[in-house]
Image (cartoon, helix red, strand yellow):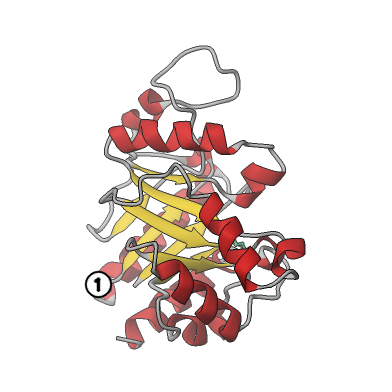
Amino acid sequence: VIIASNFKTNHTRESTKEFVQTVSDFVDLQDIKDEVLIFPSAPSLDAFVLPSNVSIGAQNAYPVKSGSFTGEIGSQQLDEFGVKMLLIGHSERRHILKESNALIEQKYNFYKELGYKIVFCIGEPLEVREKGIQEVIDYNLAQLENIDLGYEHLIIAYEPVWAIGTGVSATKQQIEQTHQILRQSIKAPLLYGGSVKVANLKEILSIPNVDGVLVGTASWNVEEFQKMIAIAKEMK
Ligand code: 13P
């Protein structure tokens, strides 16, 4: 099982350090075998000492080693901290930062070439969900159109936009149906994201074709995140 935390624009450098240390100690002490992924904000990235099944990734990076791209970070900055994992295509970057599919593809191809583990996010807005399952699938597959799905270090996160940060996750039936159909095209691990929390994690992880979760809000408190890791462990 993969349990991932997306910090978004939360935590400072100091509190990130504490969080990563606490989670690492917990993973060692509890003998956790599941994969734990943590995506801090860019200024909080660092060369952390981690258990082998805990990884630190960037929430965003520009498809370049270095250059003139004000406000962006490139692979050289990530190399300094040994970061080899990246989140690409998150809905907040697509919708708020207006990232195009073309830029997302460029990022994917660049960081794939460098061997990064890539958590690639897809997900439909509410108006698409309201049109029915076929439109939902078409929309999500279109986001994957020029993405090499055979890449060995690829993880896909299905995050319906309407379930992100709303406190209301997709229903068990919606997740089950969507993942089942997506699974026909996607062999990579398939995560669900969107208002995952301690209270619904067990149910979500028990759904067929859900290989893990990508958690925002409910993961920012380290005790809650530890509870989620513990739930994942119990479910084996
Ligand atoms: P929430 O868990 O806050 O809904 O966010 C999900 C998400 O966007 C993770 O990438």
Query: At 47% across and 36% down in the image, what residue appears?
Result: 105
Rendering coords of residue 189 (x, y %): 35, 64
Question: Dividing the image into 4 quarters, which one contains the N terminus?
Answer: bottom left
Q: Nearer the viewer, residue 169 or 80?
A: 169
Query: How far from the left and from the top, in percent, is residue 150?
Result: 29, 51
1 to 117, vertically: above or below: below
Return the x and y of residue 69 as percentages of the image width and height. 56, 17
Residue marked by disc 1? 33
Residue 154 against residue 68 in the figure, above or below: below
Q: Is residue 116 visible?
A: yes
For residue 148, side relative to residue 94 (left or right): left
Residue at the image position 53 percent from the left and 79 percent from the top? 177
Question: Is 49 placed above or below 183 here?
Answer: above
Q: Is residue 122 left or right of residue 2?
A: right
Q: Quadrant of ligand 1?
A: bottom right
Residue type of the residue flagged with mark 1: Lys
